[in-house]
Amino acid sequence: MIKILLVDDHAVVRMGLSMLLSTHPDIHVVGEASEGNEGIRKALDLKPDVVVMDLSMPHGKDGLSATSELKKLMPEVNILILTMHDDEEYLFRAIQSGAAGCILKSAPHDELLSAIQTVASGDAYLHPTATKRLMEEYLGSLKQGRTDTFNLLSDREKEVLTLIAKGFSNKEIAEKLVISVKTVETHKGNLMEKLQMKTRPELVAYAVKKGLLGYGL
């Protein structure tokens, strides 16, 4: 039995998904939440196998921030992002946040069921259009000799990068992350070395391009 937690800010959508999933004998909806923070609390309490997470939730914590935080608290949980945005930038951000899969809200019902079963088994799921775009992006990078060093950054370095982009000083970052100013400076130096950048504005521009300003820290 696959235990599901639904996180979406629209009650009608949650009800529709719950009714659909209840028709499958191997799937059981154990709870619902209307925004990211509530979703995190319920996930910690209910221990679902899969969290179906809406990407855009204007009230409370958004889907990407909630996914990133939940994966830190529950690395074993599989998160399937549900989105209406057929856009590669959202796709990349979903993957970077730790989601096991991404599916469009317009996808057929059987595709949603297949996606849930796929991520529940520990595999990744991307809708066909997304897979094609990822391959094109990857092949394009190889042809141009480009490599993305984002994945070389540690979780702490990504947190520091996000806070730098949001305009926090080294002292403020140290207080927010409960570390020393010297440690912040070390992380900043490592960021510049790994990303081959020399100035703070370059770091900010990179963070904006990666969509890190939307992350809740």
Image (tube, rainbow, N blue to C red):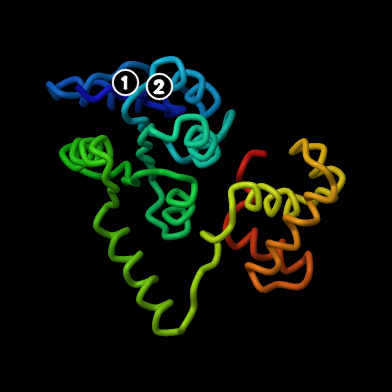
- Disc 2 is placed on an element classified as helix
User: Few, some or many C-alpha atoms within 10 Å of disc 1 (few <14, some 14-19, many ≥20)?
Assistant: few
How many callouts does the rendering have?
2
Answer above or below: position of 59 versus 25. below
- Quarter of the image for the C terminus: give it: top right
Q: What residue type is labelled 2?
A: Ala
Residue 88 percent coordinates (x, y): 42, 60
Taking the view exactly as shown, the residue that stands out farthest to the bottom is 144
Residue 181 percent coordinates (x, y): 85, 47
CB atoms of marks 1 and 2 within 8 Å: yes
> What residue is rendered at 32% in x and 16% in y?
30
Answer left or right for 94 relative to 20.
right
- Quarter of the image for the N terminus: give it: top left
Residue 148 percent coordinates (x, y): 51, 69
Q: In which quarter of the image is residue 86?
A: bottom left
Answer above or below: position of 49 versus 125. above
| Front position in the image: 45 or 211 | 45
| Front position in the image: 210 or 148 | 148
> What residue is rendered at 52% in x and 40% in y?
68
Taking the view exactly as shown, the residue that stands out farthest to the left is 25
Q: Name the residue under label 1.
A: 15
> What residue is rendered at 84% in x and 43% in y?
172
Answer above or below: position of 8 versus 103. above
Indicate which disc residue 11 carries.
2
Indicate which disc residue 64 carries.
none
